Image: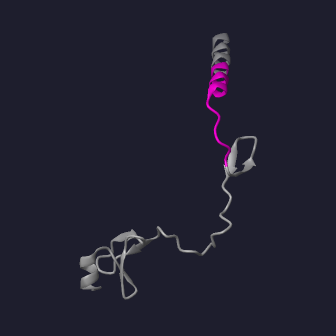
Amino acid sequence: MKYLVLLLVVAGVLWWIQRRWQAPQAPRQERPWGWRWGRTQELPAADAPENAVREDALVACSRCGVLIPKSEAKMRDGRYFCCDDHRQLGSQ
């Protein structure tokens, strides 16, 4: 039992030394909500409305149904396509 206690004390000291020698980290841009346990919560973006469509949202190809990022999709007549061939063929 005394060796277990000694092992725990040595492990605690080594952990403390390792934490002290670690490079300091940049301060987080977050609000702490559980300061005792180091938990944090990200703040919501003030300038982005909740119902805004993200630019990297996925859209389905009107021809084959494959999901692609909206920024990479080809558009024709208000429909999204995955490639130029499908855009020329149109939807089924």
Which quadrant of the rendered structure holds the N terminus?
top right
Residue 10, quarter of the rendered image: top right
Is 79 colored magenta in this rendering?
A: no
The outermost residue toward the bottom is: 77
Q: How is the image coloured?
A: one colour
| Residue shown at the point (69%, 52%) measured from the top left | 30
Residue 32 at what x, y percent from top left?
A: 73, 49
Q: Nearer the viewer, residue 1 or 5?
A: 5
Using residue 17 as the reference point, say whether residue 55 is left or right of it: left
| Residue shown at the point (32%, 73%) measured from the top left | 82
Q: Nearer the viewer, residue 73 or 5?
A: 73
Q: Nearer the viewer, residue 82 or 62?
A: 82
Which quadrant of the rendered structure holds the C terminus?
bottom left
| Magenta span | 13-28
Q: Quick check: 10 above or below 75?
A: above
Residue 66 at what x, y percent from top left?
A: 33, 71
Is 22 colored magenta in this rendering?
A: yes
Q: Nearer the viewer, residue 39 or 69?
A: 69
Q: Quick check: 7 above or below 51?
A: above
